[in-house]
C-alpha cells in the first residue's frame, strides 16, 4: 500500500519549519472543509436542482446561481467556526462580513464559485481565496490589502479534486483529492521556461474590443501558441501554471455597443486577479494590469474593484507590457 502526504501534514511541517503558529492551520482546515463540502454539492447539483439560477443579481449586477448561494453559506459557516477571521470579503456580498473583529487574526478575500457560466453545465468552476494577516506590529488598516501583502492565496478547481496554494516566499503547490477525500501529494509548481508548451487563454469573442495595441499583439502572437479557453479563471489559470503561457482579460474599450465597454477590466482585483497573480509569482511568473502595473502592487480602493489582467510566463508578460505602457 502506498500513502501520500496530506495537505494538513504538509502545512504542519511548513509552519514548524518556519517557526510559525498553528492559527493558520485552523484557518486552512476550515477552508479545506468548505471546499470539500462545496464539491459534494456541486457533483450532485444537477440531480438536486442546484445548478440553476437563484433568481437574483449580485453586487456586480450578475445573475446569482443557486450554487453561488450554497457555496457562500458553506464558506462563511466554516470560517466562523475558526474564530480566526476578522473580516471576510466575498464576491457574493456587497459589504464586508465581520466575523471576529476583536480576536481574529486574518482577512480573507474569496470568490465562492468563480466562472458562473459553467455552473449550469456542471463544468469546472473555482473557489478562489487570498489571505492577509492582521497587522500585529502597528495600527490596523483593515481589509484593503494589495496582493503583495497576502500571506497565501489558492484555488480549488471544482469538481476536479485539485487544489493549488501558494505561500509567501515558499512556492506554489498542487494537491489532488484521494479516495478518502484528503488533498494529498504536494507537488511544487514552476512555470516552464521553454515556450514549446505555452498556451494563450482569452475570450476570443472580445478580441476586437481590446485597445488597438493589444489587438495587434494578439494578431502577431496568437499563432505561436496553443489557444485554450474554458471561461472559468481558476480552470484556465490551472493550465497556465503547468503549461506556461498567458491568461489575459484585457480592458474592453472598443465594443460596438459603448455601454458594454469595461475600461477598468472585468475581473475583481482582491479575490480573482491578486489571487492568481500571487500564485503565479510564487511559480516564477508575473501579472500586470492594463497599464503594465504589477497586479500585486495595486492597493485596492474598494473591495469589489475590477482590473484588467495579464498573468503567466514572465517573458510573455514582459512582452505585452511593451504595448501596454
Ligand atoms: P464568470 O463571469 O463566468 O463568473 O470573473 C468571472 C469570470 O467568470 C472568470 O472566472 C472568467 O475567467 C471570466 O469571468 C469569463 O468571462 P467571459 O464570459 O467574458 O469570457
Image (cartoon, rainbow, N blue to C red):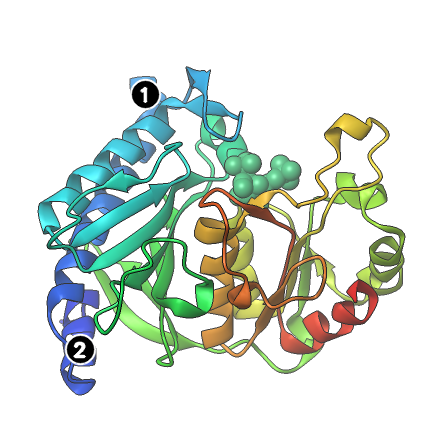
| Residue at 54%, 60% in the rendered image | 239
Q: Nearer the viewer, residue 47 or 139?
A: 139
- Give above or below for 8 relative to 157: below
Q: Which quadrant of the figure contains the N terminus?
A: bottom left
* For residue 71, side relative to residue 61 (left or right): left
- Classify residue 3 by image quadrant: bottom left
**Image location of residue 136, percent across then percent down:** 21, 70
**Image location of residue 88, percent across then percent down:** 29, 45
Q: Nearer the viewer, residue 322 or 176?
A: 322
Q: Does label 2 point to a residue whose CB lies under 8 Å from ligand 1?
A: no
| Residue at 19%, 52% in the rendered image | 85
Mark 2 secondary-structure assignment: helix
* For residue 210, side relative to residue 231 (left or right): right
Mark 1 secondary-structure assignment: helix
Q: Report crowding for label 2: few under 14, some 14 to 19, many 20 or more residues within 10 A (C-alpha).
A: some
Q: Which quadrant of the figure contains the C terminus?
A: bottom right
**Disc 1 marks which residue?**
47
- Give above or below for 228 relative to 188: above
Q: Is residue 231 visible?
A: no
| Residue at 38%, 81% in the rendered image | 169
| Residue at 11%, 51% in the rendered image | 82
**Disc 2 marks which residue?**
15
Query: Residue pushed farthest top?
Result: 55
Q: Report crowding for label 1: few under 14, some 14 to 19, many 20 or more residues within 10 A (C-alpha).
A: few
**Image location of residue 318, percent across then percent down:** 72, 75
Quadrant of the image where one finds ligand 1 = top right
Q: Nearer the viewer, residue 66 or 161?
A: 66
Amino acid at each position: 500500500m502506498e500513502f501520500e502526504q496530506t495537505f494538513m501534514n504538509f502545512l504542519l511541517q511548513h509552519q514548524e519549519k518556519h517557526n510559525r503558529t498553528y492559527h493558520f492551520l485552523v484557518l486552512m482546515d476550515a477552508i479545506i472543509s468548505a471546499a470539500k463540502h462545496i464539491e459534494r454539492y456541486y457533483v450532485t447539483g444537477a440531480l438536486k436542482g442546484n445548478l440553476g439560477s437563484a433568481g437574483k443579481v449580485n453586487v456586480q449586477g450578475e445573475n446569482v446561481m443557486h450554487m453561488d448561494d450554497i457555496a457562500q453559506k458553506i464558506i462563511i459557516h466554516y470560517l466562523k467556526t475558526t474564530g480566526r477571521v476578522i473580516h471576510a470579503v466575498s464576491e457574493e456580498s456587497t459589504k464586508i462580513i465581520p466575523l471576529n473583529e476583536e480576536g481574529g487574526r486574518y482577512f480573507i478575500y474569496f470568490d465562492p464559485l468563480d466562472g458562473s457560466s459553467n455552473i449550469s453545465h456542471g463544468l469546472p468552476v473555482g473557489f478562489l481565496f487570498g489571505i492577509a494577516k492582521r497587522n500585529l506590529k502597528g495600527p490596523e488598516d483593515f481589509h484593503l490589502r494589495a496582493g503583495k501583502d497576502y500571506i497565501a492565496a489558492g484555488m480549488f478547481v471544482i469538481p476536479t479534486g485539485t487544489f493549488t496554494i501558494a505561500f509567501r516566499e515558499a512556492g506554489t503547490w498542487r494537491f489532488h483529492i484521494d479516495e478518502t477525500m484528503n488533498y494529498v501529494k504536494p507537488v511544487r509548481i514552476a512555470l516552464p521556461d521553454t515556450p514549446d508548451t505555452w498556451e494563450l487563454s482569452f475570450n476570443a469573442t472580445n478580441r476586437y474590443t481590446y485597445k488597438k495595441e493589444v489587438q495587434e499583439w494578439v494578431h502577431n502572437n496568437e499563432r505561436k501558441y496553443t489557444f485554450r479557453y474554458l471561461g472559468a479563471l481558476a480552470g484556465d489559470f490551472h493550465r497556465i501554471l503547468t503549461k506556461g503561457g498567458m491568461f489575459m482579460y484585457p480592458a474592453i474599450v472598443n465594443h460596438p455597443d459603448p455601454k458594454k465597454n469595461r475600461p477598468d477590466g472585468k475581473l475583481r482585483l482582491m479575490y480573482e486577479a491578486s489571487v492568481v497573480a500571487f500564485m503565479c509569482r510564487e511559480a516564477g511568473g508575473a501579472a500586470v494590469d492594463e497599464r503594465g502595473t504589477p497586479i500585486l502592487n495595486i492597493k485596492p480602493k474598494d473591495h469589489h474593484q475590477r482590473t484588467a489582467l495579464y498573468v503567466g510566463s514572465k517573458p510573455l508578460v514582459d512582452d505585452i507590457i511593451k504595448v501596454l505602457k
